């Protein structure tokens, strides 16, 4: 079965171009001209391709609505935009899985779509990850921190899940960019912004992090917290498939 992509683009020429390129690579495409049109849908695509410039909303607003939807919250989203500044890309990547700056070639578009689909693989069973004081639930995109539940964005969750699966191992910003984002136009600042936001959600005192630590000269690492170290255990698959080198653990 061909992967289904919902394309949301207010410009008819852009919509026709996206459809032509993606259908030529054996994707099934449904095109929508406004945010309102796509929000009326009740089916699940494999991926959203959103133009930032829509006639009835900013693409960021639409992506935020997608992330709040029980039907779509776990689905991958790619932005395309002529807003190319670092601040605009970082704002987009707070919500989306990738951000493609215009102009771009058809080969790049297809490669980005395929890369995001490989990383996300949203159709697998829900999973849960226990790592020290933290319990990550990929179905609800929530993290339990010593009994307190906090909600994450998709990219915040993937970053934390990747670090949890590699507990106490340090990663540079570049390593995290390749493992979690795999996007050419993302900068190291993107990692720093996501780390800060994750800390604000899981740390008792974000300015003195207990879990997500900065290792001078190396980058970041996740530690179990004040309790005795415990190994991270992965049950099933799901949103954790965005992390590199994940293996399922068979029941004992």
Image: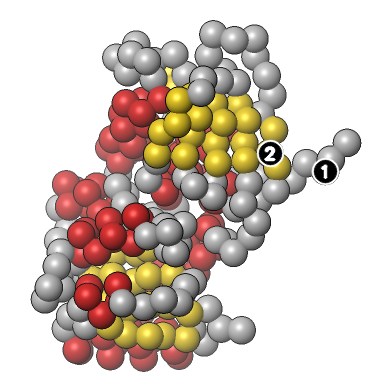
Horizontal arrangement in the rendering, residue 54 relative to residue 158 (left or right): left
Q: CA distance from mark 1 to mark 2?
A: 9 Å
Residue 153 percent coordinates (x, y): 37, 45
Residue 107 shows in the view? no
Q: Is residue 128 left or right of residue 248?
A: left
* Residue matched to label 1: 250
Residue on which disc 2 sits: 234
Q: Residue at x 47, y 86 (%)?
A: 28
Which of the marked residues, 1 or 2, is nearer the chain's N terminus? 2
Q: Secondary structure at mark 1?
A: loop
Considering depth in this image, is 109 or 136 the residue closer to the camera?
136
* Percent coordinates x, y for residue 8 in the rendering: 27, 77
Toward which corner of the image does residue 78 lie, by quadrant?
Answer: bottom left
Give the number of marks: 2
**Residue at 84% in and 40% down:** 251
Numbered label attached to residue 204: none
Picture coordinates of residue 113 (x, y %)? 44, 69
Left or right? Give the position of 238 relative to 111.
right
Mark 2 Cα-neighbour bin, 10 Å: few <14, some 14–19, many ≥20: many
Which image quadrant: the N terminus?
Answer: bottom right
Q: Which residue shows up at 45% across the image and 90% down it?
A: 24
Residue at 30% of width from left, 41% of height from top?
190
């Amino acid at each position: 079965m061909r992967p289904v992509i919902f394309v949301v683009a207010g410009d008819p020429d852009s919509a026709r171009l996206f459809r032509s390129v993606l259908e030529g690579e054996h994707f099934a495409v449904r095109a929508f001209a406004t945010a309102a049109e796509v929000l009326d849908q009740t089916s699940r695509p494999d991926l959203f391709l959103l133009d930032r410039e829509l006639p009835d909303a900013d693409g960021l607003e639409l992506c935020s609505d997608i992330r709040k939807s029980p039907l779509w919250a776990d689905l991958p989203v790619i932005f395309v935009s002529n807003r190319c500044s670092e601040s605009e890309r970082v704002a987009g990547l707070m919500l989306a899985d990738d951000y493609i700056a215009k102009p771009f070639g058809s080969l790049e578009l297809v490669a980005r779509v395929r890369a995001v689909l490989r990383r996300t693989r949203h159709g697998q069973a829900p999973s849960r990850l226990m790592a020290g004081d933290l319990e990550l639930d990929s179905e609800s995109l929530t993290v339990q921190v010593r009994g307190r539940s906090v909600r994450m964005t998709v990219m915040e969750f993937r970053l934390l899940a990747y670090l949890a699966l590699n507990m106490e191992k340090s990663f540079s910003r570049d390593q995290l960019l390749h493992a979690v984002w795999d996007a050419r136009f993302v900068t190291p600042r993107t990692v720093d912004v996501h780390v800060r936001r994750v800390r604000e959600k899981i740390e008792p005192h974000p300015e003195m992090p207990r879990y997500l630590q900065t290792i001078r000269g190396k980058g970041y690492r996740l530690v179990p917290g004040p309790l005795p170290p415990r190994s991270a255990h992965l049950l099933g698959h799901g949103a954790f498939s965005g992390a590199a080198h994940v293996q399922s653990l068979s029941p004992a």
